[in-house]
Amino acid sequence: MVKMNELNDLLTEIQSVGENFPPELQKVARFVLENTDLVVYSSIRELATMARVKHSTMVRFAKANGFSTYSEFRSVFRPKRYSGNGVSLSLSSSPENRMMQGQNSSDLEVFNTPEMNQMIKDATKIMMRAKTCFVLGVGVANAVARNFSYLARMIAPKFVSLPSDGDLPIDVLGRGTNKDVLVAMTFKPFRHEVIEAVKFAESIGIPIIAISDSPACPIMARAEIKFVIPSESPHFFPSMVPTTALFEIILGYLMTEIGDEELLNLRQFHNRRHSFGIYVEAADEPE
């Protein structure tokens, strides 16, 4: 493996090849991707303890990524804190450092960065260019996928939520091409059927937009755009609030991308609903 001198390149490479590592190195890969700042501020022995591997495994991991020593590997993390492409968590946003610093940051703060704003704009443009935009979510994420697709279809009929009508995701994706796009999401513990659907979509050339709560999620390695969205919750189930917020922001950008004719069609759609008495009370905004 070629040695990486830029943190962005290194993290992307670890995402891409991490699942091909032996099990112990996979553990280190997941830990490094989810805790980039701890690599900077912790010793190799401390990191090995937190990653639940041996000290020598950390050295093996550095060499597997093209570095002669662990110190050389670690030096890539030091020049500046990485903040691009949704891969790394900042110092203030990692759970360990929130506790250490006594912070109680809102999960929605993840959207308050220029990088995230640009990623959302780029994702929106890809969706609008696509012939069909498949939106895949299972379990608690399925409701989010369906809700977004329902609203987005009012803007453009190209949005399809998966799974649907008893089909497997690959049944519908099998009709896709490289002119389509798949928006896929899965959160810890990652769902096997989502990972397999993303692999299948990649194999037939469908571009991927990935959403997860971990940069170590297997679907990230295959994605053109990667959103790392927090899902921490005081309850047993993961929180879908930040993910729902992401899709609502995307809907706003979708509205800015459509032309005047499509905007007029959308207004006529809702006026028709009002004229047929669909709504109990008159309203200016879609429901």
Image (cartoon, helix red, strand yellow):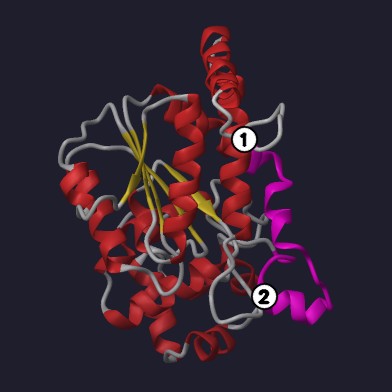
The percent coordinates of residue 260 (x first, y second) are: 58, 8
Q: Residue furthest right?
A: 102
Q: What residue type is labelled 2?
A: Pro
Left or right, 132 with reference to 121:
left
Q: Name the residue under label 2.
A: 95
Judge whether 92 appears above or below 118 on screen. below
Residue at 60% x, 29% y is 253
Q: What residue type is labelled 1?
A: Tyr
Left or right, 167 with reference to 119:
left
Marks 2/1 in contact by CB < 8 Å: the verdict is no
The percent coordinates of residue 226 (x first, y second) are: 47, 48
Q: How crowded is mark 2: few (under 14 residues within 10 Å), some or many (20 or more)?
A: some
Residue at 53% x, 91% y is 49
Give the label on residue 56, or none. Answer: none
Residue 38 in which image quadrant: bottom right
Residue 201 in which image quadrant: top left
Which region of the structure is painted magenta?
91-117
The percent coordinates of residue 23 (x first, y second) are: 29, 81
Give the label on residue 279, or none. Answer: 1
Residue at 43% x, 30% y is 127
Quadrant, the C terminus: top right
Left or right, 24 with reference to 176:
right
Left or right, 49 with reference to 108:
left
Residue 263 in which image quadrant: top right
Q: How crowded is mark 1: few (under 14 residues within 10 Å), some or many (20 or more)?
A: few
Circle count: 2
Closer to the camera in the image, 103 or 153: 153
Residue 94 in the magenta stretch? The answer is: yes
